[in-house]
Image: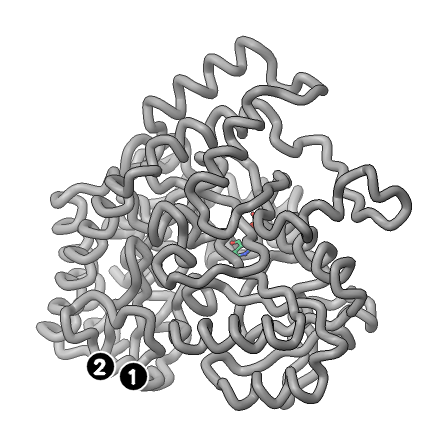
Amino acid sequence: MTILERYIDLHQRSAALYRRAEGVFPDGVTHDVRRQGPFPLYVERAAGSHKTDVDGNELIDFVMGHGALLLGHQHPHVVEAVAAQAQRGTHLGASTDLEIRWGELVQQLVPSAEKVRFTSSGTEATMLAVRLARAATGREKVIRLREHFHGWNDSVTGQPTAESTLPVSSGLPRGFLEASIVLPANDVDALDRTVREEGAQVAAMLIEATGAHWGTIPIEQSYVEKARALTREHGIVLILDEVITGFRVAPGGAQEAYGIIPDLTTMAKILGGGLPGGAVAGRADILDQIAGARGGARVSHPGTYNANPLSASAGIACLSLCADGTHQARAASAAAAIARGMNAAFREESLTGAVYGHASMLHIALGLAEQPPDGYSWGFHALPASPAPVPGEAWQALRRGMLNEGVDLMAFGLMVSSAHTADDAEQTVEALRRTLRAMKAEGLAF
Ligand SMILES: Cc1ncc(COP(=O)(O)O)c(C=O)c1O
């Protein structure tokens, strides 16, 4: 049986649900990244590091709520907090003590957080951060880095580059594209030139804290440091997007690990303990533009679900547990074991590929000839070389093959949680070994 035939055979109920879903949703799915041929998996329940699909297959989960679940699924503290709050009311239509405690935890943990404002998602956080920066500077342009992802609001979605002016989404007003400057990451000269030539029109620079796609294309710490210095010199608001890295790379996020203080930080995911939530935190003078005393010149920011009590209680439970770094260290140690085992599997199967990452985030690069010297991480450095191109069929076979073997990857990476065990690590490495063998048997060698 081929990898694809086995995938279809193992997931009949998912296939049937997908046929129904196609009549309801475009592409049959509710998130762009859940598109998967010939059909995606439908999952019924999850606990700890595992989840179970509708066909009864058990999976080791490395999607982990798209990175929201540092503590794993159903952590008892979070479940208890949410259940207790549900009994007291899910939306109180008023200010609450919960939101203060949640905000104070953010202030306590995140080095740059002088003030905080909650949103309902990371997309809303980056939208608000850019608005605040434009209001603070009276400028419109925004510098972003090629491939860096900041959600789907119009201010951060277009990707005009020197080679192409095509946006990654149609439907964007021309003005948003014209206000975007997209630069290659890790190129200090390009940034230096741009801020010297256009700095007077630039409101903000956004950086995905550990590099594009949560570090798949890692960023150099020295570049982030240079960006900090140049943005300060030119009066540009530096926004560090810590939607994924916040509370994961360290209790205070990547900024704590780098020792760099951005003007604004965007957060979501772990912030909400697995429930919807986002935040912008940072310089009090910038956040205080939201304050009502400013009258007409203020930055407006409503939002029905901002700091809603369920998310706030999950967030408080989660951040309280994340404060001393134990969960981050446990997750990172599981990630290191997985990366080392997977790198060994590539070598043993004589295939070109590497697994690398930072803290508890890992990336699989087929076609990458060099592996990290310690089998796990290059630290805050760019990749030593570009991966050789590998056919799309090989990537698809890898994803489906791993699902057949009981491992759900986050695209081609792994979000490791503190609930992942040594046993999970061993099984995951074994799953990769079997998948690579199945790929070779289908002629998908690289
Ligand atoms: C770095 C980064 N910023 C922003 C977002 C958008 O967050 P959300 O999906 O909560 O809107 C994401 C989502 O994955 C992200 O990875």
Which quarter of the image is occupied by the N terminus? Answer: bottom left
Where residue 244 appears, x then y in whole percent? 45, 53
- Residue 48 falls in image quadrant: top left
**Residue 194 vertical placement versus 393 (above, below):** below
| Of the two numbered discs 2 and 1 in the rendering, the one whose residue sits closer to the viewer | 1
Sequence order check, earlier mark of 2 and 1: 2
Q: Residue at x 51, y 27 (%)?
A: 101
Question: Which residue in the structure is indicated by mark 1?
Answer: 384
Where residue 88 appears, x then y in whole percent? 56, 10
Q: Residue at x 41, y 73 (%)?
A: 219
**Furthest residue toward top:** 87
In the structure shown, which secondary structural element does the residue marked by tag 2 occupy?
loop
Which quarter of the image is occupied by the C terminus? Answer: bottom left
Label 1 Cα neighbours within 10 Å, binned few <14 / some 14-19 / many ≥20 = few
In the structure shown, which secondary structural element does the residue marked by tag 1 occupy?
loop
State the residue in front, 409 or 285.
285
Residue 30: tell me if it is visible. Answer: no
User: CB of mark 2 within 8 Å of CB of mark 1?
Assistant: yes
